């Protein structure tokens, strides 16, 4: 268990340190696990530089499952496109644990949320291919289009799966 001052110290280094210091701070803050999620989310919301957002999102992605709900919330409510984009990137890095929550967001009313979900699924790569192919087969409308977009964004195996689904 860590101390909030230690977590805040890591976040301060992520905001202002050089590359080496930032990398070390990310490694250190992830060791705090669930305790670091809220402070990292707060820092991501208030960050004004994409480099800082990237390191914060990376830390959240490395923490994994405890950060999923907060990151999903961020992409559904954030008015700042950059914040939502980095939250989606973190979700995409977590792999299968985020697969179903992201699939559900492909039906969201907000086109930005659908786009961020597709971005995250595209970033996830191989773990999402089979599920996205199933969505294409079983859905229609926007959800189907978003699943196709996610496969297309993956390139490689994703594009091949998309082509197979279209040919079938």
Image (cartoon, rainbow, N blue to C red):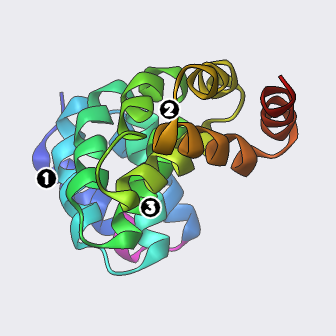
Where residue 109 appears, as percent x and y from the top left, is 28, 50
Q: Nearer the viewer, residue 27 or 69?
A: 69
Q: Nearer the viewer, residue 27 or 151?
A: 151
Disc 2 element: loop
The residue under label 1 is 5
The residue under label 3 is 85
Magenta range is: 14-18
Q: Nearer the viewer, residue 117 or 56?
A: 117
Where residue 53 appears, as percent x and y from the top left, is 41, 66
Give the number of marks: 3
User: In front: mark 1 or mark 2?
Assistant: 2
The mark nearer the N terminus, 2 or 3, is: 3
Disc 3 element: helix
The residue under label 2 is 94
Measured in 3D between alpha carbons, the distance from the residue under mark 2 to the one under mark 3, in whole angstroms, is: 15 Å
Query: Which numbered dot is residue 79?
Result: none
Task: Confirm whether residue 131 shows in the render.
Answer: yes
């Amino acid at each position: 268990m860590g101390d909030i001052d230690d977590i805040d110290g890591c976040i301060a280094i992520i905001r202002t340190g050089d590359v080496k210091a930032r990398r070390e701070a990310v490694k250190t803050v992830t060791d705090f696990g669930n305790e670091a999620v809220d402070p990292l989310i707060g820092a991501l919301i208030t960050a004004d530089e994409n480099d800082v957002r990237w390191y914060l999102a990376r830390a959240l992605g490395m923490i994994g499952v405890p950060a999923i709900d907060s990151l999903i919330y961020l992409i559904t409510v954030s008015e700042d496109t950059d914040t939502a984009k980095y939250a989606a990137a973190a979700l995409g890095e977590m792999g299968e644990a985020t697969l179903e929550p992201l699939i559900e967001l492909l039906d969201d009313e907000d086109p930005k949320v659908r786009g961020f979900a597709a971005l995250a699924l595209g970033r996830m790569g191989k773990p999402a291919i089979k599920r996205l192919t199933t969505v294409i087969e079983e859905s229609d409308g926007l959800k189907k289009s978003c699943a196709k977009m996610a496969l297309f964004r993956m390139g490689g195996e994703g594009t091949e799966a998309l082509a197979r689904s279209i040919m079938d």
